[in-house]
Image: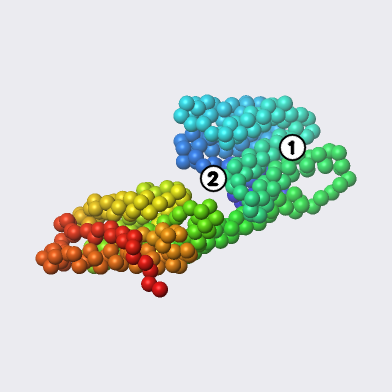
Amino acid sequence: MIALHFAASAFVSAPGIWGNLALFIGISSLAAAGVLFIWAAVPYREQASSRWMFAVLLGTYTLDLGLLIIDPVASRALTPAAVLIGALPLAVALLYLPRFRHPLRWAIVLLNVGLSIFLVLFQHRAGNGADLALNAVFFTIYLGCGIHFWYAYRRGTAGALITIAGFFAWASVFVVGPCIFAFFPNVHLESEVWNLPKYVVAVGMILLLLEDQLEQSKYLALHDELTGLPNRRLFQDRLASTIERARRNGSQAALLLVDLDRFKQVNDTVGHHAGDELLRHVSNLFTGRVRRSDTVARTGGDEFSLILEEPMSRADAVRVGQTLKKLLEDPFEFEGHSVRVGASVGIAVFPDDASDAESLCIAADLRMYAGKNASSKATPSRARKIVASESSHLERPQHHAVVNVQPGLQPAP
């Protein structure tokens, strides 16, 4: 719309009807740009009331601007058009009031009611009435853009601050310009000066795109792409922070390593896409069963790590491990297949088992594999044959590895 505005402005000096048509296209496209931005900035734009509000604003602004360009003095439709600018948005807001309420909705209604009153009072003024009306319409539109953008991007970044300032500067142009013309007629400013806020907004939005891209890159560097959980790098950082807090407070913290059993069989028999869905399912199960202060991370292909913050004891950690184990007893349904997986859990508690993050991970890892080995040795030979034969029939129930927690087992020196 802004590009169309500049393109049409190049033909405003054309004679006759073509010049007026170019002026109308240029002005209405500038108004449409603001209305489209307001609609795109609201978080509820998919609501039916939002679509109606968008249509009402675009229609009433275009009608009033067209009347101002055609014949601002003689047109009898100017007053009804000005009344519609305030009345229709208010009617939409009141009609949907029992089902929908939002502060931005009432901000736009108040802006347009104020604009409607101003237009009724001043747009018929001889001499500069049409100019005052045009400037009032665009001031309202781009002030609304600034308010909506500020609400959508309430963050203290350079891109957000520059864009918000650009929108408010853009709106102020339609007030400062007429004031300078009225009170300082000898002051002449080039047209590009008045267009400068548009470029400020553009620069701010480019910075926002870069900031969002950097934030996304940072997120991907610290999170597992498949499950969205913290990866090993972020896990190690949080584990170190947890241990430091526990050391300062003289409290305990627990580390749980959970290794899925028979995950390779799922990939080999049902497919890697089923394995991916299983990992997402497990991550959702685990995150739904721990506190918000705890951390669930995916630290390997089929390995999950949990950091349990204070208050936490060994008994609490064992109960959490048993709960996670039981969560995996229910079959996972995927495309007609019923998949069952077990888990081996290793638990280490700070400061009883280790005094630093690396030693704590080693202790938990040793206990996890000790439990896995003990479980495999305890499986009778007939059961092993059943497990092997069931790899091609995953809908049948399978044996599960038990949680083996051995408090006396210490990490190797």
Q: Position of residue 296 (x, y in %)?
A: 41, 56
**Front-most of residues 140 and 237:** 237
**Front-most of residues 396 and 381:** 381
Residue 131's disc is 1
**Element under label 1?**
helix
**Front-most of residues 305 and 35:** 305
Q: Position of residue 347 (x, y in %)?
A: 36, 59
Judged left or right of residue 6, residue 279 is: left
Rendering quarter of residue 113: top right
Gap in angstroms between the C-alphas marked 1 and 2: 28 Å
Q: Is residue 390 among the parts visible in the rendering?
A: yes
Under mark 2, the amino acid is Ala
Image quadrant for the C terminus? bottom left
Q: Position of residue 75 (x, y in %)?
A: 67, 29
Compared to residue 383, the image places residue 50 above or below, namely: above
**Front-most of residues 171 and 240:** 240
- The structure's colour scheme is rainbow
Under mark 1, the amino acid is Asp
Q: Position of residue 409 (x, y in %)?
A: 34, 65
Tell me if mark 2 has few (under 14), some (14-19) or many (20+) residues whose alpha carbon lies within 10 angstroms of its own: some
Residue tagged 2: 40
